[in-house]
Image (spheres, rainbow, N blue to C red):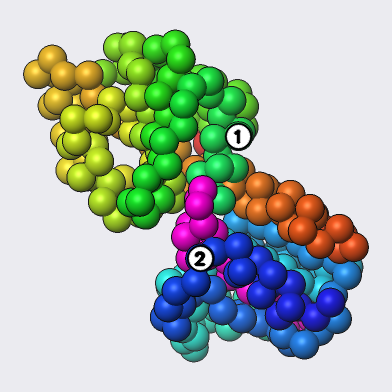
Amino acid sequence: MKAHEIMQTLFATAPEGDYSNSCDTLKAGDPERETSKVAVSMFATPDVVREAAAWGAELLIVHEPTYYNHYDRHSDEKIENEKRRLIEESGLTIYRYHDHPHATSPDQIAAGQLRAFGLKGEIEYTDVFDLVRVHLDTPMTPVELAKQIEKNCGIRHLRICGAANTPCSVVSGMFGTPGKVFEELKGDKCEILLTGEACEWSLGEYARDAAQLGHKKALIIMGHIGSERDGMVYVADLLKEMLPALDVRYIECGEVYTYTD
């Protein structure tokens, strides 16, 4: 298949709509390229590009921007130029797959994250972008939840704001850096909110104040990659099922942070 035909197959999993302003576009390479090997990752880091090319991939599908802005608008900045040269030399065709997986029902990124978390309970998918809730069969504290996620997903050093040791029954997931996170955190339904990135002086302090005022409220910050990576693993598995003739591999980009322990 050609690279753009593979992407159209993926895009078709989302409902029809106006995607004319979507960031899910070609970022590098030839959309007409015949493709038998597809690499999937969160980011097209230099190491991911090198690994995908060394494996022999023709197409690399990523969830997030390649050139540091939402629409990958090019600049003449030094590091960006070096990265663009590396990608051109690799010969890879690169597409972004962001808006469509978040528009599917269920949200493909959320479905992959929940699969990896291993939570037991009833899943509530909502019509709010990137919002899913899990009504737990057995209440657990934010500390217990964070430890389970760290173990199951390989994320290091989750951060907890708020009522860390209070048993909770509802977990809200708003992965990555979506809008309306604060609205969900303030809502009566929200007890634990999982997200990727958050402003400490607003969301973090709200969760802390709520807990100190006696409310069952906590915010768990997973890091952007940790909060969506298993969603892209899910996308890779989905692509294998949809197009079994393709050789599909998920390539890990790793967390952006380096830790002292």
Badge 2 local density, few (<14 within 10 Å), some, or many (20+)?
few
Residue 103, given in percent of the width and then of the height, sits at 47, 60
> Does 99 lie within the magenta span?
yes
* Residue shown at 28% from the left, 25% from the top: 191
Q: Residue at x 49, y 85 (%)?
A: 74
Task: Tell me residue 75's x, y (percent).
Answer: 47, 86
Any magenta on residue 66?
no
The magenta region covers 86-107
Q: Nearer the viewer, residue 41 or 117?
A: 117
Say which quadrant the C terminus sits in.
top right
User: Where on the picture, by quarter, is residue 164?
Assistant: top left
Comes first in the chain, label 1 or label 2: 2
Using the image as rendered, state which of residue 186 and residue 72 is in the foreground: 186
Q: How many neighbours does mark 1 have within 10 angstroms: few (below 14), some (14-19), or many (20 or more)? A: some
Kind of residue indicated by mark 2: Pro
- The answer to whether one can see residue 218 in this image is no
* Residue at disc 2, secondary structure: loop
Q: CA distance from mark 1 to mark 2?
A: 22 Å
The image shows a total of numbered marks equal to 2
**Label annotation for residue 15:** 2
Please state which amino acid type lies under the numbered disc 1: Arg
198, 10: nearer the viewer: 10
Residue in the image at 24% along x and 24% along y? 217
**SS of the residue at dot 1?**
helix
| Residue 115, numbered label | 1
Specify the quadrant that holds the N terminus. Answer: bottom right
